[in-house]
Image (cartoon, rainbow, N blue to C red):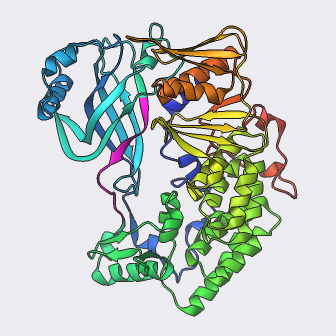
Amino acid sequence: MHHLFIKSFVAVTIGWLTVTAGCMGPILRHQSPEAKRGDTSETTLISNVAHPYGMNYVKLEAVALVTGLRGTGEDPAPSPQRAALLDEMNRREVEEPNAVLASLDTTVVLVRGFLRPGIQAGDRFDIEVRTPSRSETTSLRGGKLLETRLTETAVLGNQIRKGHVMAMANGAVLVDPSADAEKETALATKGRILSGGVTTKSRNLGLIIDHQRQSVRTSQQIGKAINKRFHSYIDGRPMGIATPKTDEFVELRLHSRYKDNVGRFMRVVRNIALAESPMQLQTRLQLLRDQLLDPVTSATAALRLEAIGNDEAIAILQEGAAAEDAEVRFYAAEALAYLDETSAVSVLAQAAREEPAFRVHALAALGAMDDGAAYDALRSLLSVRSAETRYGAFRALWTMSPNDPYLHGEKLGDKFTYHVLNNAGPSMIHVTSSHRPEIVLFGKDHQLHLPLVLDAGPQILVNGLSGAKIKVSRFGKTTQQRVVSTDVDAVIRAIVELGGTYPDVVQMLQQANESGALTSRFRVNALPEGGREFSRSRQDNDLGTPKPELYGKEI
């Protein structure tokens, strides 16, 4: 049963998209014609004169070498990929590069990664690796990608052409732990290195002014309007986030409130009024109030009130957060959260707990707040039954306060992040195959049933046949062993002490789960999903009563 890992490898989780949900639009319905044509005919929004720059994902590629394969690699045949790798090895002055490539403990791989919008120099991102077509390599399990330079790449004239180096990558390869190298070569010869890439150049965000509106005056107007709404602090001084560069381009610096939600940041910026008199603003606020209280137009109205961001806009949003309609309440509360208003917290916490269609956005909004009430709400969600709500709340808490002692984060063997949470609720173990190598234990009582024999990578065996002890052995030139209890925490630490990597630990846990040896609930990438539809037909006076068919499986 490796469907969980297959799903995660097919659907690349872009950063923390499912909880930050930055690039997603309204999830419920098309907006009404009134919402589409703008607030009033007299108001010009930035979206009317400029469009975003830097919101695409940039694909980086490289040809690289994976080592440590224990005989499952190959001596690659002549090809552009082999030639490119030999050039790189010669540049690094590797001795006898052809002899290195001839070893069956190595193989050539194709490396790929995507730079998300707004990523800054030093930020990490996932790396995907796979063997080339017609490769005779049978498995990448246990492999390690050597340091690799990533560039935008193209094949021209049967030769690989590279652009500027934009990132570096290396690390242990995570292969689907249950993939059989003999029966499922396609799965065994591809994998991922979680947070294995480090970008060397920041990506700029900005606005490109429409051709017919390009002028220095328009560029300055846009910069002034944005800086009136947003500023950040540099060396203790408030500085606007927009810098007009030319008559056609305005550079943007991502506001810290939206650091994990770039898409929403850009939508809010584009809904700022370019120029507006006080009387025009009052007229527009009244219209936006009416639109906010209408479920059909509430999403757009809430975003535009967030873009205004003054006390009057906040008062209207607070009215919406207390409305009877669930959609109105949610969209109003979401906007209030990005304005760091406490009144958003209870509505968003209820949405995260009870309504799957709103969950991903509710958790993202709570995680963006500095308010202590939001922190307390997320803490309370760590103990609910829903796996995706619990782990989504954990990720939102980590986004809000990565150094929070309650999260109990430690780096095990400098290989992955490990968290043991002393919280209520069903015992659950969560692992990731995207974003970062991380294991989270919800609760402290996690046991393994004996007897069991589990693999932890190609060199480590976990053996517990009788008694209350488990022997963890690493085989090589010499055999190393640790004898521990049946406690999962003790077994994980023993594997790491013997040199095991994150993929090794994940393989052990997945095998334990599939064999029934693991007593705790086990989940992979249990993150809320975007794009779920909210059914208005089932909402009550509260956020909504779940239909049994929607919850046919536990989420």
The one of 14 and 312 positioned closer to us in this rendering: 14
Of the 4 image quadrants, the one containing the C terminus is top right
Image quadrant of residue 509?
A: top right
State whether residue 8 is above or below residue 303: above
Of the 4 image quadrants, the one containing the N terminus is top right
The one of 529 and 369 positioned closer to us in this rendering: 369
Q: Horizontally, is 117 left or right of 77 in the view?
A: right
State whether residue 40 is above or below residue 20: below
Please provide the residue range marked out in magenta: 192-205
The one of 116 and 428 positioned closer to us in this rendering: 428
The one of 470 and 349 positioned closer to us in this rendering: 470
State whether residue 419 is above or below residue 26: above
Q: Horizontally, is 326 left or right of 340 in the view?
A: right
Image quadrant of residue 368?
A: bottom right
Q: Residue at x 16, y 38 (%)?
A: 161
Q: Horizontally, is 298 left or right of 84 in the view?
A: right
Q: Position of residue 496 (x, y in %)?
A: 50, 28
Q: What secondary structure is the stretch in magenta mostly built from?
A: strand
Name the residue furthest right: 541
Q: Residue at x 76, y 45 (%)?
A: 383
Image quadrant of residue 219?
A: bottom left
Q: Position of residue 460 (x, y in %)?
A: 50, 16
How many dots with numbers?
0
Q: Position of residue 252 (x, y in %)?
A: 38, 69
Q: Position of residue 526 (x, y in %)?
A: 63, 37
Is residue 152 visible to the viewer in this orientation of the structure?
Answer: yes
Q: Residue at x 57, y 66 (%)?
A: 36
Q: Residue at x 79, y 43 (%)?
A: 424
